[in-house]
Image: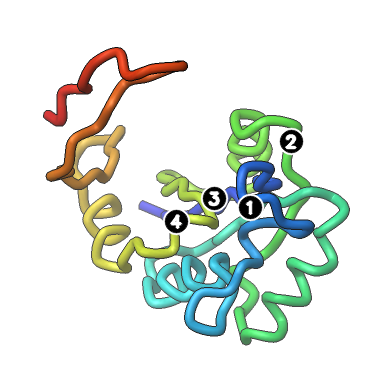
Amino acid sequence: MTFGMVVLAGGIGRRIGRAFLKQFLLLGGKPLLVHVLEKARAIPELEQVLITCPEAYLGETRQLLDNHGFDHRFRCIVGGATRQESVYLGLMALEGIDSVVIHEAVRPLVTADEFRTLIASPDENAMFGIPISFTVLRRHDYVEGLLERD
């Protein structure tokens, strides 16, 4: 079985109010995207890692890959207008891959072991999640209730 990964790096981050994409925000001196890609780099089973990003940032994203020493397994393409379209374009660009891990560039606290857990799953449709221990509120203009944590 061959494994690949699609990393979604197209979010423009309107809510954070910055003039640049949130995947380029620094955490510990490195862009969020680099943190995710370093976890992927540690997994030799991932034969291809495809990053989808806005066309205006394609060159900058490719330069980031070069600057951080990512090899031929890592490449960038222009993503779509929506997350769903970006996933589709990423899946279509992977060649000869049987199973795919999909992850967002702005979720850097994932571990390589969590990716390995997905890859090793006997289920062909697996999702990794962790339980939350805090209260989650449902709201619009006011609190409407609690969401079930299970």
Around disc 4, counting alpha carbons within 10 Å, would you say few (fewer than 14), some (14 to 19), or many (20 or more)? few
| Mark 4 residue element | loop
Amino acid on which the number 4 mark rests in the picture: Arg
Residue type, label 1: Ala
- How far is disc 3 from disc 2 in space, using C-alphas? 13 Å
Q: Residue at x 81, y 59 (%)?
A: 58
Q: Considering the numbered disc 2 on the image, is that residue within a helix, a strand or a loop?
A: loop
Q: CA distance from mark 1 to mark 3?
A: 9 Å
Residue name at image x 55 percent, y 73 percent: 34
Q: Closer to us: mark 3 or mark 2?
A: 2
Q: Is residue 18 left or right of residue 87?
A: right
Q: Which residue is mark 4?
A: 107
- Please report the residue visible at 55 percent of the width from the left and 61 percent of the height from the top: 48
Q: Describe residue 128's horizontal placement relative to residue 148 as left or right.
A: right
- The first of marks 1 and 4 along the sequence is 1
The secondary element bearing badge 1 is classed as: loop
- Mark 3 or 2 closer to N-term? 3
Report whether 35 appears left or right of 148. right
**Tag on residue 9?**
1
Q: If you read the primary sequence from the N terminus, does the residue marked by circle 2 or circle 1 appear first?
A: 1
- Secondary structure at numbered mark 3: strand
Position in image of residue 66 (x %, y %): 71, 82
Mark 1 Cα within 10 Å, few/some/many (few <14, many 20+)?
A: many
Relative depth, front residue between 2 and 24: 24
* Identity, as a three-letter code, of the amino acid under mark 2: Gly
Above or below, comparing residue 81 to residue 15 in the picture? above
Q: State whether residue 133 is above or below residue 136.
A: below
Camera-nearest label, 3 or 4 = 4
Which mark identifies residue 6? 3
In front: 20, or 78?
20
> Which label lies toward us, 1 or 3?
1
Measuring from the top left, give residue 30's x and y in whole percent: 56, 80
